[in-house]
Image (cartoon, grey):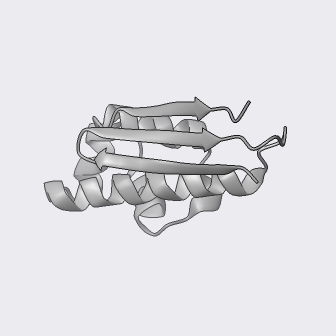
Amino acid sequence: MKEMELHRDSCESNCALSHESGGESVLGPMASAGARSELMQALAALIRRRGWTQKEAAARLGVSQPRISDLTRGKIELFSLDALVDLAAVAGLMPRITVISGE
């Protein structure tokens, strides 16, 4: 079985996505959902820690205020993994993907 998880060394500065392969060739949608969830939580926590309003967070991250509202309310179905990785990078979280093969 494959696992994919987001590790937050210090979520303020680093986020790493790890994928471990145990012989299967397809990762599946649950791995992506888990990564999206972790990124959303990291971004929402950063917004709270910095004391940003939704309007201020939107301006700083280059998205609309309703988009920040969706993020902070956990509307995971509205965000692609790509979009969240990009937002995390803009926020200074430095997301990265690490692939570890069992072969």
Residue at 28% across / 41% down in the picture? Answer: 59
Q: Quadrant of residue 100?
A: top right
**The quarter of the displayed image where residue 21 is located:** top right
The N terminus lies in quadrant: bottom right
In the depicted structure, whether residue 7 falls above or below residue 100 = below
Report the front residue among 101 and 7.
101
Q: Which residue occupies 75% across, 44% down?
A: 22
Left or right of 25 on screen, residue 85: left
Examine the rendered structure and indicate whether residue 87 appears above or below residue 2: above
Residue 2 appears in the rendering:
yes
> Is the residue 66 above or below the residue 7 in the image?
below
* Image-quadrant location for residue 99: top right
For the point 50% across and 66% down, the residue is 74
Tell me: 40 left or right of 62. Answer: right
Farthest residue toward the right? 25
Q: Which residue is drawn at the image coordinates 50% and 43% (left, top)?
A: 84
Q: Nearer the viewer, residue 41 or 57?
A: 41
**Could one spot residue 62 in this view of the protein?**
no
Say whether residue 48 is left or right of residue 81: left
Residue 31 rendering spot, x and y as whole percentages? 67, 52
